Image: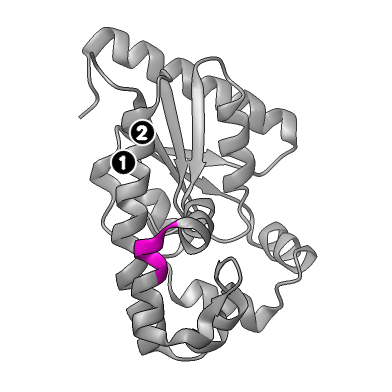
Amino acid sequence: MRGPVTIAVTGPFASGKSTLVHLLGELPGSETASADEIVHHLLKNDPRTISRIVEHFGENVLGPDGIDRKALGREVFGDAEALRDLEEILHPLVRTETDRRIEASGAETFVVEIPLLFETGRGEDFDYTVAVTVPEERRRTWAEERGVDEAALRAIEARQFTGEEKARRADVVVQNDADLDKLKEQAERLRRMISQERGSHGDHR
C-alpha cells in the first residue's frame, strides 16, 4: 500500500510557514508535523537525544523534564561551533522521527514544516517542496511582533538560505502577500494541483 503524499513547507523566518501548514492540515485527509515541534518532543521525551546532548554539553543542560532548552540555548548562543555540534546531533534524529511519523500515518497527505529543508539536504526526501515568500517589510514586522529584534533576526538569517534561494529550489512557491483568505485559496489550489498530478502521472518523484 502506498504511503501518504509528502509535502515539505519551508521559507524564511516569520514568513507564514506555520500558518500554511495549519491550513493544509485542515484539508480532508491531511496530517501535519513541524521540525521545531519534533525537536521539542525529542528534547523532552527521547532518552537517546537527551543522553547525546548531555554527553556533549554537560549535565548543566539537564532539567526536570528532559533538556532545559534555555540552558542549552545559553551553551550555543554566539558560538558557531557549538551550534553546529548541536545541529549535527539533532538533524539526523529529527529526520528519523519525521520518517517514523510519516510511515505510521494513515493520512492521504502528510505535511511537514522544515525551516532548514534545503540547507540540510532534505529537499529530495519529499514528494513536493513548497517555499513560502512574503514581502520583506511585512516579514520584519511579524518578526518584531514575535519579540525578535533586528540583531536576532540577522543571526537567524545567517544560518539560512535567502527566501529567493528557497523559492528557486522549491517545486511550488506560495506568496503570502495578502490576507488569510488568499492564503487559504492557495492552500486549496495546492491540494488540487497535487491531487490532479498524482492522478494523472503517478508519483511525483
Quadrant in which residue 54 is drawn:
bottom left
Q: What crowding class fits label 2: few (fewer than 14 Cα within 10 Å), some (14-19), or many (20 or more)?
A: many
Residue 4 lies, in percent from the top left, at: 35, 23
Q: Residue 194 carries which label?
A: none
In the rendering, at what x and y percent does residue 125 appear? Answer: 25, 42
Residue type of the residue flagged with mark 1: Asp
Residue at x-position 51% and y-position 72%: 157
Q: In this view, does 102 lie above or below 26?
A: below
Three-letter amino acid code at disc 2? Ile
User: Which residue does the image show at 20% across and 30% down from the upper left?
Assistant: 205
Q: Nearer the viewer, residue 31 or 156?
A: 31
Magenta stretch bounds: 46-50
Q: In this view, does 190 lie to the left or right of 138?
A: left
Q: Is residue 200 magenta?
A: no
Q: Pick the residue in front: 43 or 85.
A: 43
Q: Is residue 47 magenta?
A: yes
